[in-house]
Amino acid sequence: MHNRYWVLGDVLTFNIRDLFRSSKRNVAIFIDGPNMIRKEFNIDLKEVRERAQKYGRIVFGKVFLNQFASEKLIEAVVSQGFEPLVTLAVEKDQDIDVHMAAEAMEAAYSSNIDVIVIVSRDTDFLPVVQKAKKKGKITIVMGSEPGFSMALRNAADHVEDLTKK
């Protein structure tokens, strides 16, 4: 027996640390606020956090909002332990996708993050998921129907449908 490996006969060799790795993984959560935090979806941020904890220790969670987010919404985000990031938009329907993608890519290149969680229904985050996987990150996509991108689902390592409780 080596201090890092267990060998059972000549058949099975595994790293003992891998058995406990899931609890030591660092998780980063990125939530597409305008796309997901809507009355019609009834998304519970506490549930998002609980589902993400299955994959490891949450290092941070960021909710991306536009300047039209209400103070009540921002307070609710903070009270659930997430960091609200408010992006100024020139027009009301302008996306925050670019800002969220940039933050998620920074995490994908970080050696301190093992798992990237994208909470969105939007295909725009497909390149982020693909690049994070290339960088060796575990990718989780959480979304809801209607309009939960099939391409985004298929690219992720794990999918969590928030419409199913």
Image: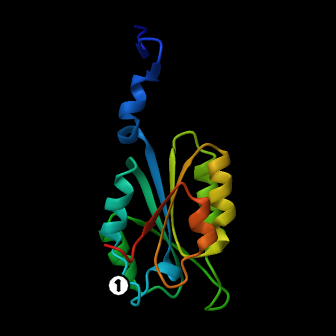
Total marks drawn? 1
Position of the N terminus, as image quadrant, is: top left
* Residue 126 placement, left or right of 79: right
Residue at image location 43% in from the left, 86% down from the top: 38
Residue at image location 47% in from the left, 64% down from the top: 62
Dot 1 alpha-carbon crowd within 10 angstroms: few under 14, some 14 to 19, many 20 or more: few
Foreground of the two, 108 or 138: 138
The quarter of the displayed image where residue 97 is located: bottom right
SS class of the residue under badge 1?
Answer: helix
How far across and down, in percent of the image, does residue 19 sit?
A: 37, 32
How far across and down, in percent of the image, does residue 74 sit?
A: 40, 78
Please name the amino acid that badge 1 sits on.
Lys
Foreground of the two, 130 or 10: 10
- Which residue position holds label 1? 72
- 80 versus 70 height, above or below: above
Residue at image location 45% in from the left, 23% down from the top: 14
* Residue 8 placement, left or right of 89: left
How far across and down, in percent of the image, does residue 56 sit?
A: 38, 47
Position of the C terminus, as image quadrant, is: bottom left
- 104 versus 12 height, above or below: below
